[in-house]
Image: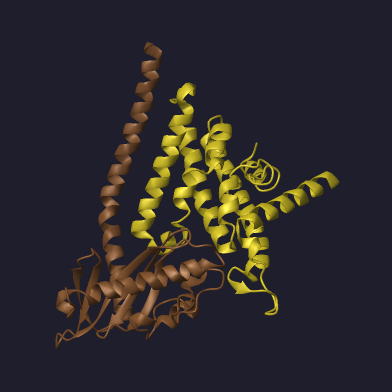
Chain colours: A yellow, B brown
Amino acid sequence: MSFIKQLSRGLIKENPTFVIVLGMCPTLAVTTSVINALGMGFAATFVLICSNAIISLIKDITPSKIRIPVYVVVIAAFVSVVDMVMAAYVPALHKSLGLFIPLIVVNCIILGRAEAFASKNNVIMSIADGIGMGLGFTLSLSLVATVREIIGAGTWLGMRVTPLTYDPALIAILAPGAFITLGFLMALMNMLKEKK
Amino acid sequence: MKYYLKLGLILFIFCVVATGILAYVNSLTAPVIAQRKATEEKQAREALIPNAEFEEKESDQGLTYFVAKDPETAEILGYTFIAADLGYSSTVQTMVGVDSGFKVLGIRIVDQGETPGLGANCTLPAFTNQFAGLAVEDIYVNKDGGVVVALSGATITSRCIANSLREGIIDVQDEPEQGGEQ
């Protein structure tokens, strides 16, 4: 299988949020605005690519019985390193993404891909999978956030898109709005899939 | 038995390597982060009270505050400190500057994790600007008889900010070298 083909699988066909239904916590929690969704998406993509590469490299020296704790240690250590380095050297980026970095440790997409893909494939393919899954995650987060931000705040990426007479329906950016939006979007995805 | 010991040992080695890497990275980055934080706070203080020299002090209540003095005449221009109190869903930290008569010069929300669209609106200038010029006795939300217009749907957040500011200012006022009575 080619690099590009593996990369494209994560975007639509095996989209982590809508198809594999992984990483629901961040999907529900950070999609109150598009900028948050993009921040979380890119931070997770970066960690996913690197953790996939490292786990693929150490797959031959990891006994299968203790592979999960080993993955958890690798991912947690990696996320902490990224957090500290960003805080020290790129403070502007850390300010906008900083909130999401500790959340990535518990993002099950990372562990899920380590277990389901990186532990069975070579480094190049694992990186492709990391990029694809990461971008697919970013895409679906932005989609949920777009709906919630426009309905709930009347803005998109912080710019006003609705007429001033529109009174934003706050429920969309509160917790119930996350569940409602996700449900409708998932139903829409399934409808489109069945039509094919 | 031996097999399980071996597994444990391998996991232990992984953890030791990971801890070693983390300790090394932390030793490199911790001083840089601490310095950056200090610079940022200094800039925030200078934005509230420009052209002043700051002196760090601690009140009897354990509040760290800064006395702003004119660098030439050593006249006290005002005070700044970070007031913190529990809001609706997070601790709201507010940096505040007051002049020598303890009237608010300006406030800035430094850190908060309140409800998006409701309490989180406390960072907007429309809310923070109304504190400028207020004296201690005015800093109550309108529901409590003050002049601070609470955010709609977020009275708890607004009240927490107003109360933490007021208590902080009173705390600094009561310091002996500021002429307060003990």
Say which quarter of the image contains residue B94: bottom left
Is residue B148 in view? yes
Query: Could you say which is closer to the camera, residue B165 or residue A103?
Result: B165
Quadrant containing the N terminus of chain A is top right
Query: Could you say which is closer to the camera, residue A192 or residue B84?
Result: B84
User: Is A115 situated above or below B99?
Assistant: above
Say which quarter of the image contains residue B53: bottom left
**Count of labels in the image:** 0
Q: From the top left corner, tell me how far across and down residue B163 is, in percent.
A: 38, 71
The answer to whether residue B110 is left or right of residue A34 is left
The answer to whether residue A135 is left or right of residue B144 is right
The answer to whether residue A69 is left or right of residue B45 is right
Outermost residue, bottom side: B73
Q: From the top left corner, tell me how far across and down residue B26 is, in percent.
A: 29, 48
Query: Could you say which is closer to the camera, residue A152 or residue B41?
Result: A152
Is residue A139 in view? no
Q: From the top left corner, tell me how far across and down residue B4 is, in percent.
A: 40, 16
Say which quarter of the image contains residue B147: bottom left
Query: Could you say which is closer to the camera, residue A99 or residue A133?
Result: A99
Q: Residue at left 56%, top 29%? A: A120
Q: From the top left corner, tell me how far across and down residue B121 is, in percent.
A: 51, 71
Q: Residue at left 59%, top 60%? A: A32
User: Is B38 situated above or below B77?
Assistant: above
Outermost residue, right side: A195
